[in-house]
Image: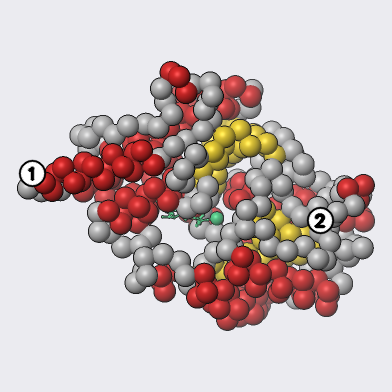
Amino acid sequence: MTGESEPLILGIESTCDETGVALVRGTELLIDRTATSMDEYARYGGIIPEIASRAHLESFIPTLDSALHEGGASLSDVDAIAVSAGPGLVGSLTVGICAAKSLALALDKPLYGVNHVIGHMAVDGLAEGPLPERFIGLVVSGGHSNILLVENWVDGVRELGGTLDDAAGEAFDKVGRLLGLPYPGGPHVDRLSQQGDRDAIRFPRGLHAVKDKDRYRYDFSFSGLKTAVARYVEGEKARGAELRAEDICAGFSEAVNDSLTAKTVRACLDTGCDTIVIGGGFSANSRLRQLIQERAEGAGLTVRMPPMRFCTDNGAQIAALGARLVAGGAAPSDWDFSPDSAMPLTQTWMAPTNADMAVVSEYECCSPNR
Ligand code: KG4
Ligand code: ZN
């Protein structure tokens, strides 16, 4: 139940190129504001960490001011602060963490350094009401393609599988580059794929052989697929044929999404869960959204996917996860936590080093970091 009695959480996101600030009370999103430096990277063909860090520094205060102003709130209303602690770019994360620590110290509020990737699932709970206790998560972005079993937000996230090489978004970006599309290629490859014939070219599915069925039951591999696309393009060019980019994108997208959806549905059935929760930048992919819905329905499962505005990195995902941690009795992080660019997906937040203090009563967890 959402109500004034639930703590107001300020979420701060600065993992990569988006500066996000949001306010969440329970499962209700009050305001979500984002600034992005993505436009600066098209000419470089990738994110430049130094530029991203500076952009966070410039954008943070204006984004915070705009969120508070439009949310009709003041900093003194905030009960706890959650900030992305990883995984991500160290320089970018450092800007958000420094800002969050300064605010928490000045306001005398508890601070939670949270896992950005787990936030990509938590944000789904803001869209169509609370998520079930137990579910299978598929987190897909430029850096991750993982199947997770979530049994509780505080200490119940298990990694069932992930990619052995490229992430789904990364593979799309590389194929985009191969086809001469602007950076980031993912959305462009998606757009072209919708105009192509997905059965025209059959690209291989990684780790689908019978021999891989048990060992790599929930794992993915997209680098062989990317090479197959590169070979196909080279072959077509060598014989002077006109490239059918739409069909290439459609066939490639089908191979990626066939793997992602088949293994996610399998994990859900194997673990006796009834819900699949999708999150991450790649969850904007049109074929993923269509195929997971079809396959889940066919297996009697429910799918929760984020509205498009929550697919890109945002402050709401961080505030949403902070709210789940506070509700679950998680103790605030120690003041001296640092960004962790490779934060494990099983670690929801920077728990205090004194393990006995990791879970406290709800009252205590809304008092400042000890
Ligand atoms: O989660 P995110 O914003 O950032 C991280 O990587 O953490 O995800 C960005 C990735 C990029 O690789 C981008 O190309 C991909 O998600 N992406 C897409 C689509 N929208 C974004 N890939 C395929 N289809 C899309 N519609
Ligand atoms: Zn992300």
Please state which of residues 86 and 65 is positioned toward the viewer in this rendering: 86
Location of the C terminus (image quadrant)? bottom right
Among the 4 quarters of the image, the one containing residue 322: bottom right
Tell me the residue at 45%/45% (across/down): 166
User: Would residue 341 appear left or right of 359 to someone viewing this image?
Assistant: left
Give the image's coloring scheme.
secondary structure
Q: Amino acid at mark 2?
A: Glu
In the picture of the structure, the residue carrying the numbered disc 1 is: 239
Ligand 2 quadrant assignment: bottom right
Query: Badge 1: few (under 14), some or many (20 or more) residues near its Cα, within 10 Å?
Result: few
Mark 1 vs 2: CB contact within 8 A? no
Query: Which residue appears at 77% of the width and 76% of the height?
Result: 102
Give the mark nearer the N terminus: 1 vs 2: 2
- In this view, the mark in front (1 or 2): 1
- Pointer 2: what residue? 6
Tell me if I can see residue 181 in this picture: yes
**Residue 311, image x, y percentages:** 51, 54
Dot 1: element = loop
Q: Position of residue 170 (x, y in %)?
A: 42, 51
Badge 1 amino acid: Arg
Q: Residue 66, located in which quarter of the rendered image?
A: bottom right
Whether disc 1's CB lies below 8 Å from ligand 1 is answered: no
Coordinates of residue 204 in the picture (x, y in percent): 32, 32
Residue 26 in view of the camera: no
Q: Residue at x 54, y 24 (%)?
A: 215
Spatial separation of the CA atoms under disc 1 and disc 2: 65 Å
Please name whichever residue, 296 or 86, is drawn nearer the observer in this view of the structure: 86
Answer with left or right where residue 108 lies relative to residue 201. right
Whole-percent x and y of residue 51? Answer: 50, 75
Secondary structure beneath dot 2 equals loop
Q: In the figure, 94 relative to 245: above or below?
A: below
Q: Tell me, for residue 165, which label it has, or none.
A: none
